[in-house]
Image: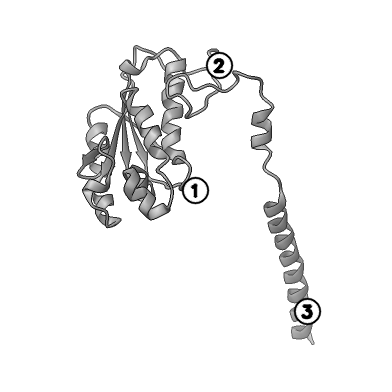
Amino acid sequence: MRSVTTGLLIAISGGVVGAALASHDTFSKTAPDRSADIAKQQPAGFWTTPAVKGYGDIHYDRNAAFQPTLDLSNKVVFRVGQGGNNPAMPNPALEKVAQVVNLYTAAGVPANKLSFVVAVNGGATPAMLDNAHYQKIYGTDNPNLRLISALQSQGIKVSICDQAIAWHHYKKDWVAESVIHTPSALTTITTLQNSGYAYLEM
């Protein structure tokens, strides 16, 4: 009798927990994302892209703490290793680099005082392809090429890991000509860290 009662209690408890989880899952899937609507409600000029035009929107407050300044080295190596969900849109991690550049510029540190290097590998590797090969694989133009060009116009070095190229079974000449080839993103990062660069994982 005791085992039957215990079994019933477990079944009831499991049903309650399962229902709760199902309810939570349903809520998670149906809860609307209001962030885009909120952004649209901001006044003109609230979001700006002072250096990398059209990429990496920022809202800058010069009264905020820990501002970038000219008296620092301003040397940063960024690792961009995550791919985006939409091949027709720029890589989100690469666009975050643009956001950092815009923030430094807004704070009064001009691009010619920045020593920024982007080390690309992993899932972000396809973003470095030239347009012909990107289009062949994804059926759309490479939206990252304009972003890469915009970053480079500000003196930002964009590099690709040759190990990642090999793992993706790409040929080196499939990569956009303006992108710098390195032995690996990992050694790029460690080499630059040993030269005083701060490290940011994007």
Residue at x 41%, y 24% (from the top left corner): 101
- Local packing at callout 3 (Cα closer than 10 Å; few below 14, some 14-19, many 20+) is few
Left or right of 92: which side holds 32? right
Q: Nearer the viewer, residue 124 or 189?
A: 124
Residue at x 55%, y 13% (from the top left corner): 63
Could you tell me if residue 145 is visible in this image? yes
The residue that label 1 is drawn on is 86
Could you tell me if residue 202 is visible in this image? no
Q: Residue 177 placed where, x, y %?
A: 25, 38
Left or right of 175: which side holds 58? right
Give the spatial CA distance, label 3 vs label 2: 60 Å
Which of the marked residues, 3 or 2, is nearer the chain's N terminus?
3
Mark in front: 1 vs 2: 1
Quadrant position of residue 78: top left
The residue that label 2 is drawn on is 61
Total of numbered circles in the picture? Answer: 3
Picture disc at residue 135? none
Which of the marked residues, 1 or 2, is nearer the chain's N terminus?
2
Q: Nearer the viewer, residue 16 or 160?
A: 160
Indicate the amino acid at tag 3. Answer: Leu
Q: Nearer the viewer, residue 123 or 73?
A: 123
Residue at x 27%, y 51% (from the top left corner): 165
The residue that label 3 is drawn on is 8
Indicate the amino acid at tag 2. Answer: Asp
Relative to 132, say whether 38 is above or below.
above
Instruction: Please say if the residues under marks 3 and 2 sit with CB atoms less than 8 Å apart.
Output: no
In the picture as drawn, the residue positioned furthest to the bottom comes out as 1
Indicate the amino acid at tag 1. Answer: Asn
Q: Residue 181 placed where, x, y %?
A: 22, 40
Relative to 190, say whether 51 is above or below.
above
